[in-house]
Image (cartoon, rainbow, N blue to C red):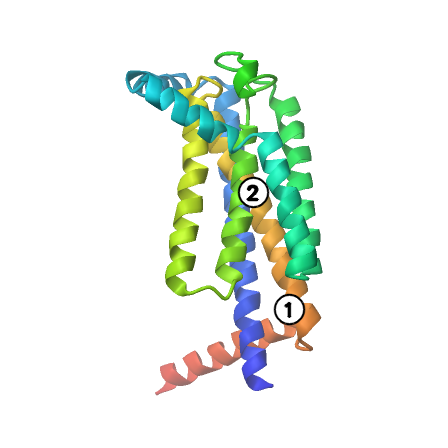
Amino acid sequence: MEVETKKAGFLAMGLMIGLRIAVLFIWMFAKLAEEVLEDNLERFDSSIIGFFETLETSTLNAVYTLLTEMGSVWFVASLSVILILFLWFKAKDKWATLVFVVAIGGNGALTWLLKQIYERGRPSINEAIDAVGFSFPSGHSMGSLVFYGFLIYLTIRSHQKRAVKIALSMALGLLILLIGTSRVYLGAHFPSDIIAGYLAGTIWLMLCILVLEWIRWQSNSQVNLGHALQGLFFSSYGTTTQQRKH
């Protein structure tokens, strides 16, 4: 029981750290949005867009067009249905299924809401690459981070070998970054839109994962996380106090 209590304490600390990181990202998003509203990022956006323009080739056009499709609504939605079916029928993980549905559905609603709030125009309009509507934050960046980020979480939580977990997580992380850069390369978004999408997506994903971790623990353990955190804190405090006395 003591070992389980310690595990609960460390999990509770992890949840608290995660919440603090989420709060930090909220602050960063708010500051970025303020800069966007005050048109203070024009030089930053222009310099990065100019850099990508120097890289333009027919091969990169094809590659980035494919990558941007991997972050599109229809593609992510299709993969989401497959993942939901897998989690529900194969993995039989009802809580992961429920939280994933909330993560994807909530991300769509949050993306739409933020776009309506800031109403930032796009660098260019191109329906062929799903570049319509408002620009800030990038829906592709938010959606890919939440979906592929959740896949990274499931990979880390799986029973695969460590090398497989690391390789798959790095590949998915790289894909998230490439989808974001594809939107800048194809002229669909400003770089600051992409950064904002990553920030907002990270906030939402972290909150969903924290909730899922809390539910998992509460469902499988009789140890209360709050009490475990208090016990761990007072235990550490007592040990530190004794060391100082000696």
- Estimate the x, y position of residue 100 in percent, counting from the top left: 65, 49
Residue 125 is at least partly visible in this image? yes
Residue under numbered circle 2: 146
Residue beneath the point at 68% across and 69% down: 218
- Estimate the x, y position of residue 3 in percent, counting from the top left: 54, 83
Q: Quadrant of the N terminus?
A: bottom right
Circle nearer the N terminus (2, 1): 2
Residue beneath the point at 49% across and 26% down: 193
Q: Are marks 2 and 1 in contact (CB under 8 Å)?
A: no
Height in image: 205 above or below 75? below
As helix, strand or loop, the secondary structure at mark 1 comes to helix
- Estimate the x, y position of residue 162 in percent, counting from the top left: 40, 64
Label 2, label 1: how far apart the Cα atoms are = 22 Å
Which amino acid type corresponds to the residue marked 1 in the rendered image?
Answer: Trp
Height in image: 108 above or below 136? below
Residue under numbered circle 1: 217
- Estimate the x, y position of residue 198 in percent, counting from the top left: 49, 37
Q: Nearer the viewer, residue 55 or 29?
A: 55
Height in image: 77 above or below 171? above
Residue at far left of view: 54
Residue 54, by quadrant, is top left
